Amino acid sequence: MKTTYILLFLLFLGYHVYSQKINNLVSFRDIESASYLRFNYENDFFSATDKNYTQGYNLELAHPSLKKNPINRLFLKTKNYNTRYGISIEHIGFTPSDFVSPAIQFGDRPFASAIMLKSFTVATDTSKSNRISQSLSLGLIGPGSFGKEMQVKIHEATGNKIPGGWDNQIKNDIVFNYRIDFEKLLYRYNSIFAINSQATAQVGTLFTNISAGVNVSLGLLKSSFSLKKNKRKFQLYLYSQPVVSLIGYDATLQGGFFKKDSPYTIEASKVERFTAEFNYGLILKTSILYFEYAKTTITREFESGNSANWGGIKVGFTF
């Protein structure tokens, strides 16, 4: 089919991989139900830091009734695939190393935050062990996303230093982003080991990039490419996801796509076009519950920056 050929082209286009800060649609995070609710939370607190990607959350709902969502008409058609439909709200925030000073931190990351409403589909072809995820995000980057208010309140509640530089954040601009992911099962050994290839293409006013990579799972697990009823009521496994990235555009560094008058941004020539990232974690599932603890490390994203680390938890349930 034409869609598969396009995605295979993206998969083998190169070794460049884009990494989403909150990537809830990858196969090793699959919840085996058409109806579920999951909360995804990430923070650099888990790595004892407070800079770069400082916090993100995503509240995600999947339900068959969302098949009627008119946004789904904009997605590529996936015939002969079993499709799951969902929506989510997502917020991400970024700060420089010295987030307390009210002065612009030249040579460091700008303050930035974005909030988005996301529509998504996850389509599985069990006969070919393929999986296609698509999402469209609509929202806002800038003060209107309440990044300043959120971080200040959290720091006040926890007794931490109060951020003072949010007045220099990336200004308000529109977020309109489309993303498509393709995964294929490469090898599976019984119900204890699996390795999948993956490819990603994303274009929009927030992030633009292309990607490819792998993810590996080890433990007590069920295939995410099968629609058979899960006889294993309990799953517990480790995963790892090494990636490298080719970056086209990053509004959290370079400023909004349309508005170019932010107080401070990173010049396009200073953005690192290639980065390396490693994601790993532990996932526990039952027939009803989902729990995950994750960690991430990434190389610098701009010339004068440093590597960054963060962690997160994800909690969900089916209904």
Image (cartoon, rainbow, N blue to C red):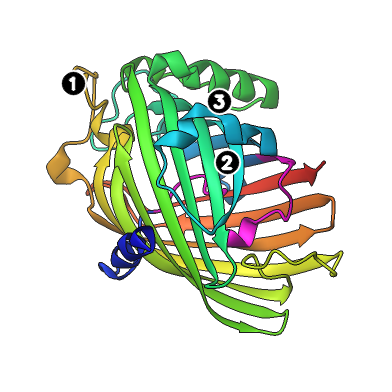
The first of marks 2 and 3 along the sequence is: 2
**Is 198 included in the stretch rendered in magenta?**
no
Please identify the quadrant where the N terminus is shown: bottom left
Residue type indicated by callout 3 = Lys
Image spot of residue 219 (x, y percent): 72, 75
Q: Residues within 10 Å of mark 2 (few under 14, many from 20)?
A: many
Query: Going by the image, does 228 lie left or right of 294?
Result: right
| Direction from residue 71 to residue 32 in the image, left or right | right
Instruction: Choose the circle earlier in sequence order: 1 or 2.
Output: 2
Name the quarter where the C terminus is drawn: top right
* Residue on which the image places disc 3: 161
Span shown in magenta? 19-39
**Quarter assignment of residue 4:** bottom left
Judge by depth and name the residue closer to the eye, 35 or 113. Answer: 35
Q: Are there few (<14), some (14-19), or many (20+) residues within 10 Å of tag 3?
A: few
Question: Given contact means CB atoms under 8 Å apart, are the residues at marks 2 and 3 in contact?
Answer: no
Q: Identify which amino acid the numbered label 1 is placed on.
A: Lys
**Residue that mark 1 sits on:** 260
Q: Position of residue 286 (x, y in %)?
A: 84, 58
Q: CA distance from mark 1 to mark 2?
A: 28 Å
Image vertical order of residue 112 relative to residue 40, above or below: above
| Residue at the spot of label 2 | 43
Asked whether residue 279 is in view, the answer is: yes
Between label 2 and label 3, give the one nearer the viewer. Answer: 2
**Which disc, if any, is residue 11?**
none
Q: Secondary structure at mark 3?
A: loop
